[in-house]
Amino acid sequence: DAGVIQSPRHEVTEMGQEVTLRCKPISGHNSLFWYRQTMMRGLELLIYFNNNVPIDDSGMPEDRFSAKMPNASFSTLKIQPSEPRDSAVYFCASSLNVGGVQPQHFGDGTRLSIL
Amino acid sequence: RKEVEQDPGPFNVPEGATVAFNCTYSNSASQSFFWYRQDCRKEPKLLMSVYSSGNEDGRFTAQLNRASQYISLLIRDSKLSDSATYLCVVKVGTGRRALTFGSGTRLQVQP
């Protein structure tokens, strides 16, 4: 079974550059989540989509961050312009939300380093 | 106050020991509770759900105390492979709000 697929696995770039992270959720899942994890702040929810519609983006740190889900099988998280404090591991997760609470399945994450 | 609070640890225990972690949550409307496990440099994975009556899965026992607003995870006969960070996860209400993750408790099982 294909799990949640994220790309790239690692990204190192200079501050000011645009960064685009990609996620393919598990087929059939209707909820998709973007998280950021750092040692200092732990795992933080940035935004989540249900049926491709953003439901809660209150965790998006600032206007430099944007996320889209153009269809059920693809989502992007974009940072423009990037800053060193954006360095973190970014996880995408998906779940099947059909009324009960279903477990979230995480991708391997993207390790982002902004120099 | 954080919505979900955990002792970061690390908890260093010998193989075969029993170890327990607690997690407190601030919102009394929290309805669903989980423990996730995260290995070093890996993604979080669901370990077990936590049911009101408490539940067991092999060496792992999870309990919920609604009155005091905490959940616990007990690991018996700990193995080296149990070394990981254990994340407490809470969902408030039954609507479309997402899960809230604690910062995790790190467990190191030593030979």
Image: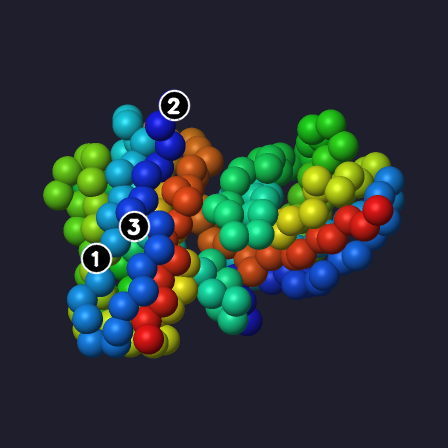
Tag 3 residue: A8
User: Callout 1, which amino acid?
Assistant: Thr
User: What is the image's colouring?
Assistant: rainbow
Question: Marks 2 and 1, how far apart in space?
Answer: 26 Å
Residue A91 visible in this rendered orientation of the protein:
yes
Dot label at residue A20: 1
- Does the CB distance between marks 3 and 2 fall below 8 Å? no
Q: Which of the marked residues, 2 or 1, is nearer the chain's N terminus? A: 2
Question: Marks 3 and 2, how far apart in space?
Answer: 20 Å
Task: Give the total number of marks visible in the rendering.
Answer: 3
Q: Looking at the picture, how far across and down is residue B73, in whole percent?
A: 71, 44
Circle 2 — which element? loop
Circle 3 — which element? loop
Q: Which of the marked residues, 3 or 2, is nearer the chain's N terminus? A: 2
Are labels 2 and 1 on one chain? yes
User: Callout 2, which amino acid?
Assistant: Asp
Q: Looking at the picture, how far across and down is residue B59, in whole percent?
A: 76, 32
Q: Chain of mark 1?
A: A
Q: Quadrant location of residue A29? A: top left
Q: Work out which residue is located at the far left of the displayed protein and give it.
A: A70
Tag 2 residue: A1
Residue A97 visible in this rendered orientation of the protein:
no
> From the viewer's perspective, is residue A62 above or below residue A25?
below
User: Callout 3, which amino acid?
Assistant: Pro
Are labels 3 and 1 on one chain? yes
